[in-house]
Image (cartoon, rainbow, N blue to C red):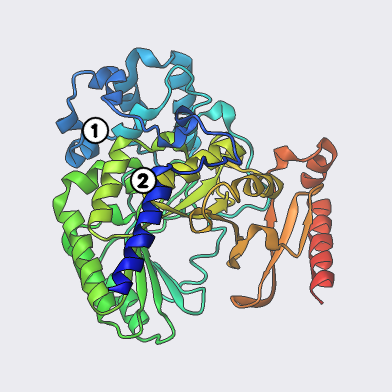
Amino acid sequence: MANETVSASASSSLLNVVGQGPSPIVHLKPRVDESTLTHRHLKDGPFWQQIPAWKDIDEATFLSHLWQEKNAITTPEKLVAAVRDLASDDFIKDVEAGFAVAPMAVRISPYLLGLIDWSSPYQDPIRRQFLPVKSQLEPDHPWLTLDSLHEQGDAPVPGLTHRYPDKALFLALDTCPVYCRFCTRSYAVGTDTDAVEKVSLKATDERWEQALQYISERPEIEDVVVSGGDAYRLRADQIRVIGERLIAMKHIRRFRFATKGIAVQPMKVLTDTAWTDAVTHVVDKARKVHKEVVIHTHFNHPNEITSISQRAGNLLMERGITVRNQCVFQRGVNDDAETMITLVKKLGFINVHPYYVYIHDLVRGTEDLRTSVAAGIQVEKRVRGTTAGFNTPMFVVDAPGGGGKRDMHSHEHYNRETGISVYTAPSVKKDQYFCYFDPISSLSPAIQKDWADEKKRAQMMDAAVDQARSSTI
């Protein structure tokens, strides 16, 4: 009875405190106007109807992945037919000239075409990534190679790169729902162009069997990236075959399907139920044996994220599928801090985890998109601290020559005057030095002149490596 009395007394005391109302909260930071949280504002409505050719296309039709594939833009003629009065004749001629010298075949989805600001196509960040215009192109860096990352050199069988000790990259096919100008695999992906005859990585049973057999015979491999090309282009039965073969290998602990598709054609997740069900099946089966399967995708600019993206992301989350993002740092696209911060926060808002931001690889025909390492360092400083650490991407340089991904800040030497940064990769290729090069246009006129001189070019390279060597001794 005494305990009950105490309890009642305490309860009464608590009620008195509650009755007085909560103490006023002291806000140490100014209140935020919700309208300024722009990363939560996603493009909605029939935005594609700005394109004259699609002004009467309803949402159900536009969300069909089959309609998207059928109406993809692959030639200047198709572009003209779609945009008609939106683009000037001069712009179309500029694109035609750009197509003629591009190392990548051109393919852009109706979804992306509808997101371009056609009142200012030269400056639009989505156009810059997919439609080359000759007037903006710059000469390739003199030390550029077509396969700058040395993926073929590290391939024991065609289409399988084994560079890192416990990870392999399986290039299952060589086609994509769109073709990015900046693709580091322009040596293989897409059809031949006037500028490049492609290495064939077709999805054949024989080539797949070689790759999967190699993986099965290497017990140190625990991690596999299934890429290409693009996993969006794998049929549902192919997703299941690859997934179940990898799950059955005792030493494989995790793998990911790499697709830009969620960024450039999110409606496939919603309307190609066979494909989404196949991925779900593989993820569920792997989880039951305590293995991880995720999707890696590729958004580069906030304007690429719409309410359709969010719907696709929501469905994948409901299925228990983790999605991570790998972004490419590009001039005129996302190389300013505010754009990158908005991208990172928008990705988090739709439950896509920002994972990597790659300093642009040395890819033919894309010098106008490349930036300096210094630009990446400045933007990364601004991004870090704006959101949770697990939603903050790591900025990396994929070291030319096969050194693999290196933290952008981890260079052994960086000469901002010559634009040469030097990296080492002791766990990947011991005792080697890997050089990345800032775009020539970012350097002083005097140094640009030196880069045009083969002898001085070699001297700058030797000096940079010597400096790096002395710093690592």
Q: Residue 20 lies in what quarter of the image? A: top left
What x and y, as percent, mark residue 113? 35, 29
Q: Horizontally, is 236 left or right of 403 in the view? A: left
Labelled pair 2, 1 in contact (Cβ < 8 Å) = no
The span from disc 2 to disc 1 (Cα, nearest Å) is: 27 Å
Residue 294 vs residue 248, the one in the foreground: 294
What x and y, as percent, mark residue 109? 31, 36
Q: Residue at x 38, y 38 (%)?
A: 305
Q: Residue at x 23, y 18 (%)?
A: 55
Q: Horizontally, is 297 left or right of 435 in the view? A: left
Amino acid beneath label 1: Asn
Residue 106, disc: none
Element type at marker 1? loop
Residue 71, disc: 1
Which is in the foreground here, disc 2 or disc 1?
2
What x and y, as percent, mark residue 200? 36, 59
Q: With respect to residue 457, does 178 lie above or below? A: above
Q: Residue 473 lies in what quarter of the image? A: bottom right
Q: Residue 223 lies in what quarter of the image? A: bottom left
Q: With respect to residue 236, does 376 lie above or below? A: above
Amino acid beneath label 2: Ile
Whether residue 351 can be seen here:
yes
- Provide the residue designation for mark 2: 350
Badge 2 density bin: few <14, some 14–19, many ≥20, Cα 10 Å = many
Element type at marker 2? loop
What x and y, as percent, mark residue 142? 68, 48
Residue 242 vs residue 270, the one in the foreground: 270
Q: With respect to residue 466, does 90 lie above or below? A: above
Q: Residue at x 47, y 74 (%)?
A: 162
